[in-house]
Amino acid sequence: MTPRHNRQFRGEIGRLEREKRNGHRAVTLWFTGLSGAGKSTIAHAVEKRLFDQGRNVYTFDGDNVRHGLCGDLSFSRKDRAENIRRIGEMTKLFMDAGTLCLCAFITPRHEVQKALRALHSEGDFHLIHVDCPVEVCESRDVKGYYKLAREGKIKNYTGISAPYEAPENPDLYLDSDRQSLEECVDNVMAYLEDKIML
């Protein structure tokens, strides 16, 4: 038998076949914003709406990625970039399986946001900026991380001791301070229906 380790092996079932069976395209929606802006809350609510419609969908956030796939990484600038790179590669595999991927991560730097878009094929990656004033994010911080950051007990905390670079040209903008959760979800769903033609 000829060894296959020197070439990529592709099965007989491709992404288009999976999308056709699922009845929708597979894309990645990447929610970026400060801690406490509502990224995960919105992503999970969108996931529920899509799931109830019969869509094949999954949400990735710090709770289900940081402790497993990226459990070996610290919160240094280098490791944070590696954390996002791994998730980006993982979403490509999930899209190949026909899954709508919802990712909720701070992703504070322009260069990482751009690298994520470059990692994906044209039309597969959609950056959503969940905007919220840092004061409001602090008021929602039940874990007290902002307080610890202001006391200097947490170093390089985004929005306090480390910068957050809002996306220059997000595909969708949400104002989670002024818009309700339902309004944010409705806007994401309208975007999906308009741009991705589910």
Image (spheres, rainbow, N blue to C red):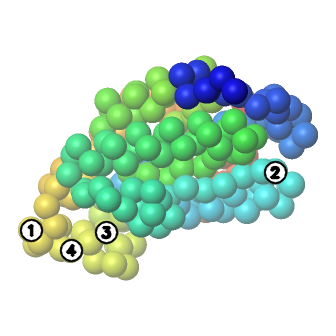
Residue under label 1: 152
Distance of mark 1 from mark 3, alpha carbons? 15 Å
Dot 3 falls on a residue whose secondary structure is helix
Alpha-carbon neighbours of circle 1 within 10 Å: few (<14), some, or many (≥20)?
Answer: few
Q: Earlier in the sequence, mark 1 or mark 3?
A: 3
How many labels sit on residues?
A: 4
Residue under label 4: 147
- The kind of residue on which mark 3 rests is Glu
Distance of mark 1 from mark 4, alpha carbons? 9 Å
Which numbered marker is on residue 111?
none
Residue in the picture at 24% in, 56% down? 75
Q: Which-is-in-front pick, marks 4 and 2?
A: 2
> Is residue 132 among the parts visible in the rendering?
no
Q: Are marks 3 and 4 in contact (CB under 8 Å)?
A: yes
Residue in the picture at 79% in, 58% down? 51
* 73 w.r.t. 173: above or below: below
Residue in the picture at 58% in, 21% down? 7
Distance of mark 1 from mark 2, alpha carbons? 44 Å
Dot 4 falls on a residue whose secondary structure is helix
Q: Earlier in the sequence, mark 1 or mark 4?
A: 4
Dot 1 falls on a residue whose secondary structure is loop
Image location (x, y in percent) of residue 36:
40, 64
Residue in the picture at 55% in, 55% down? 60
Residue under label 3: 138
- The kind of residue on which mark 4 rests is Lys
